[in-house]
Image: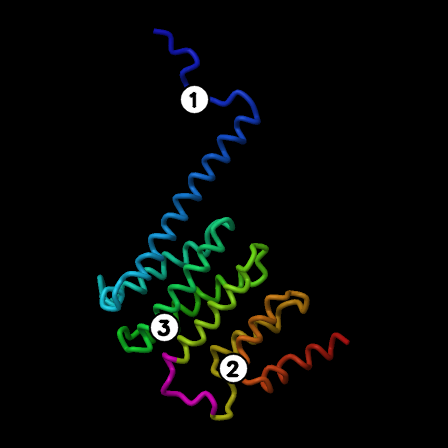
Amino acid sequence: MNFAGSISHVSSFDELITEGEIEEHSLLQLRLGAVAMVKGMLACASDKCLAFHSREYVPFCVELFTEVHEYCMGPISLRYHAFNLLQTWFRKFLHLVSTDAVQCKNFIQSYLMRKTLDIVWLNWDSPVDDVSELATGSLKHLFEAWEVAHKDQDRLSGKDPSPFYSSILLKLKSVAWYIKGQYRVMSALVPYVGSQFVSETFVPTINSMS
């Protein structure tokens, strides 16, 4: 039996591109399927299910966040859907923590804070339509979660902002003025640090450029 030519190969550069595109499309479909599955879990699962400590006292909703974060750090073709999923996750998580269904203060002020800020910094000027707005929306949700975790503290006492907010302001000061995404972040910060503090922080920098 003659097996000549039975081995899979490409006969031209055009065919190579076509096979590569098909493979990329198939991979994207798999990833979109995974995003849809996680979104379905968040939409349909009960509070009790999402708050269930499946292992090592980690609520199921927290385990899902690691998956959502991975999607947001994934290929750019997935970013819009991934950040929509992140919005869904935050809304469900905020509901759980505000009703005391889960107690996640340590998670909020460590892992959640760090990972959310990472993806916001990487996507606040994303070329993908609506992703920069969704990233800023996720940051607003993070601020809400932070406030819930620190609801016993009086943030309106007239003192300087917490180190958490101050660290974000410090990050913004190091960003070039023409990066548009930083102004969305600055706007999101105002309700928590006050417009006067933002002005006092950035006006000297603006004046130095004039």
| Crowd rating for badge 3 (residues with CA inside 10 Å; few <14, some 14–19, many 20+) | some
x then y, percent, for residue 108: 37, 72
* Residue 8, numbered label: 1
Mark 3 to mark 2 CA distance (whole Å): 18 Å
Relative image position of residue 161 (x, y in whole percent): 50, 84
Magenta residues, start to end: 148-156
The residue where tag 2 is placed is: 191
Q: Residue furthest top?
A: 1
Task: Give the residue type at disc 1.
Answer: Ser
What secondary structure is the magenta-colored segment mainly? Answer: loop
- Pick the front one: 19 or 203: 19
Left or right position of 175 against 121: right
Q: Is residue 152 magenta?
A: yes
- Tell me the tag on residue 77: none
Badge 1: residue crowd in 10 Å (few <14, some 14–19, many ≥20): few
Check the image and name the residue furthest to the front. 44
Q: Quadrant of the C terminus?
A: bottom right
- CA gap between label 1 and label 2 equals 60 Å
* Magenta residue check for 208: no
Residue at image x 45%, y 65%?
116
The reply, left or right, for residue 26 in relation to residue 132 is: left
Q: Residue at x 57, y 58 (%)?
A: 126
The amino acid pointed to by label 2 is Pro
- Between 74 and 114, which is closer to the camera in this rendering? 74
Q: Nearer the viewer, mark 3 or mark 1?
A: 3
What residue is pinned by disc 3? 94
Seen in the image, is 115 located left or right of residue 193?
left
